[in-house]
Amino acid sequence: GAPYPVFTRQEVGRHRSLAERVWVTYGGEVFDITDFVELHPGGKSKILLAAGGALEPFWALYAVHSQEHVLEILRAYKVGEL
Ligand code: HEM
């Protein structure tokens, strides 16, 4: 597949707001989910809790995300790897 740029967790952590763009990680992948924030079925405030960091701790609490169609959405926003 196409090569993605590689980012550190520190770099991801600089993207925590709509103004600085909202990045998250899942596994070893990095996603810019800025354009999805307003579309999130669980609301803007919830999704922003994960801004700048890993999705796993939050998705462990909200099992509604353990579905292929959710991962498909996420995949569309991939911008890099760790
Ligand atoms: C629901 C995507 C992050 C909390 C959903 C649904 C999608 C989605 C597609 C609907 C699932 C369904 O009903 O089949 C995402 C994506 C995320 C993300 C792509 C990250 C990029 C988060 C985070 C939290 C969260 C970080 C909590 C801190 C919720 C909750 C619902 C939900 C509570 C259930 C809403 C309801 O049905 O009332 N999310 N989510 N999500 N999400 Fe997220």
Image: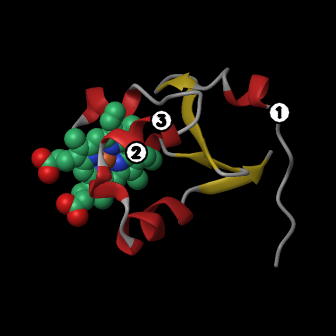
Which structural element holds mark 2?
helix
Q: Residue at x 33, y 39 (%)?
A: 61
Q: Quadrant of residue 24?
A: top right
Q: Residue extending furthest bottom?
A: 1
Which residue is at the front of the view, 58 or 25?
Answer: 58
Alpha carbon distance from label 3 to label 2: 6 Å
Left or right of residue 45, residue 78 in this image: right
Q: Earlier in the sequence, mark 3 or mark 1?
A: 1
| Residue type, label 1 | Thr
Image point (28%, 26%), residue name: 45
Quadrant (top left/top right/bottom left/bottom right) for the C terminus: top right
Q: Residues within 10 Å of mark 1 (few under 14, many from 20)?
A: few
The residue to which callout 1 is attached is: 8
Give the alpha-carbon distance from disc 2 to disc 1, as whole Å.
Answer: 21 Å
Indicate which label's residue lies in the foreground, 3 or 1. Answer: 3
Closer to the chain start, of discs 2 and 1, is 1
Residue 2: x %, y % from top left = 83, 73
User: Quick one: label 3, few (<14), some, or many (20+) residues within 10 Å?
Assistant: few
Secondary structure under badge 1?
loop
Q: Quadrant of residue 25?
A: top right
Q: Please say if the residues under marks 2 and 1 sit with CB atoms less than 8 Å apart.
A: no
Query: Do we see residue 23 in this rendering?
Result: yes
Residues marked 3 and 2 touching at CB (< 8 Å): yes
User: Residue 59 has which mark?
Assistant: 2
Secondary element at tag 3: helix
Residue lying at 86% horizontally and 47% vertically, measured from the top left? 6
Mark 1 near ligand 1 (CB under 8 Å)? no
Residue tagged 3: 57
Across and down, in percent, residue 29 comes to 69, 52
